[in-house]
Image (cartoon, helix red, strand yellow):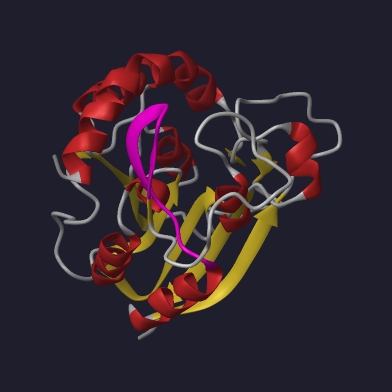
């Protein structure tokens, strides 16, 4: 199967596990970002002027980011490859009384006309599960001139230190040369990661000006570990990156 078909099947299987967290995230009164819940004031992935903006979330999953955008006055569309993830998002819409379009589609082939949106956003959606050489040009295509792109992904350093199974190491375990498509022994999904130079060249070639990149570390008071991104590791090295870019006129 193609990576698109593989990831669609993978996320249909994972949908029940992510549905457990959907209600909590939909209920949040303020956005938080990434695995260690960075505040919106620290990481402004939703711009202050999002009210009235047309927002496209690529890889929306259960739709909570789109819900946050809607509550801030935006006009979001949630797009995801997984029908079962979108079914959870639809249930949350009904429960919380929010309504916005949910579209099942591949973020590498976005089914919208050119210059349709003011903001394209992705938190662990298209940002790692789609080929950046395909989804970044699509994001540029559907953005209006001076439209914004914000996305959160695993840090490049984490990907170089992450073993096939287990927690991230304090040693480089994977070459950066040729970094692009990654598959895991313990996970049937297919991820995509690039080095910083490749990200910069790709974004600029696609028509973006890069405005910022924030590296995220675990806060000192964090107590939550997962199987890969331990607090000990994430206090020492950036565990996530948030990129901010704007479409050139």
Q: Is residue 241 above or below residue 101?
A: below
At 29% from the left and 32% from the top, the residue drawn is 99
Image x and y of residue 237, in percent: 74, 51
Question: Would you say residue 218 is visible in this rendering?
Answer: no
On the rendered image, what quadrant is the N terminus found in? top left
Q: In this view, does 156 lie above or below 230?
A: below
Image-based side of 108 in relation to 121, left or right? left
Q: Which residue lies furthest to the right in this view?
A: 220
Q: How many labels does the image show?
A: 0
In the foreground, 243 or 89: 243
Residue 114, image quadrant: bottom left
Residue 242, image quadrant: bottom right
Question: Would you say residue 194 is visible in this rendering?
Answer: yes
At 79% from the left and 30% from the top, the residue drawn is 222
At 30% from the left and 57% from the top, the residue drawn is 131
> Principal SS element in the magenta part?
strand
Residue 63 in magenta stretch? no
On the rendered image, what quadrant is the C terminus found in? bottom left
In the foreground, 209 or 192: 192
Q: What stretch is highlighted in magenta?
A: 182-195
Residue 2, image quadrant: top left
Image x and y of residue 105, in percent: 17, 44
Image x and y of residue 57, in percent: 35, 48
Q: Is residue 119 above or below residue 30?
A: below
Image-based side of 82 in relation to 57, left or right? left
Image x and y of residue 112, in percent: 15, 58
In the foreground, 240 or 209: 240
In the foreground, 169 or 19: 169
At 53% from the left and 19% from the top, the residue drawn is 24
């Amino acid at each position: 199967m193609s990576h698109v078909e593989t990831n669609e099947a993978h996320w249909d299987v994972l949908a029940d596990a992510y549905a457990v967290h959907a209600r909590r995230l939909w209920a949040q009164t303020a956005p938080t970002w990434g695995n260690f819940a960075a505040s919106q004031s620290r990481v402004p992935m939703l711009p202050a002027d999002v009210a009235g903006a047309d927002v496209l979330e690529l890889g929306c999953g259960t739709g909570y980011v789109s819900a946050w955008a809607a509550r801030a006055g935006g006009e979001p569309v949630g797009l995801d490859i997984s029908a079962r993830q979108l079914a959870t998002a639809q249930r949350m819409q009904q429960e919380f009384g929010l309504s916005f379009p949910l579209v099942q589609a591949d973020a590498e082939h976005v089914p919208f006309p050119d210059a349709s949106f003011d903001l394209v956003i992705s938190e662990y959606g298209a940002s790692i599960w789609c080929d950046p050489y395909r989804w970044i040009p699509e994001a540029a295509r559907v953005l209006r001139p001076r439209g914004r792109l914000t996305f959160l992904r695993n840090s490049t350093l984490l990907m170089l230190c992450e073993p096939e199974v287990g927690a991230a190491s304090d040693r480089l375990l994977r070459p950066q040369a040729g970094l692009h498509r990654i598959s895991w022994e313990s996970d049937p999904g297919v991820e995509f990661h690039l080095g910083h130079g490749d990200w910069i060249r790709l974004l600029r070639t696609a028509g973006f000006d890069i405005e910022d990149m924030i590296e995220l570390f675990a806060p000192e008071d964090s107590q939550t570990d997962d199987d890969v991104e331990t607090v000990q590791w994430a206090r020492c090295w950036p565990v996530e990156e948030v990129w901010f870019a704007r479409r050139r006129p």
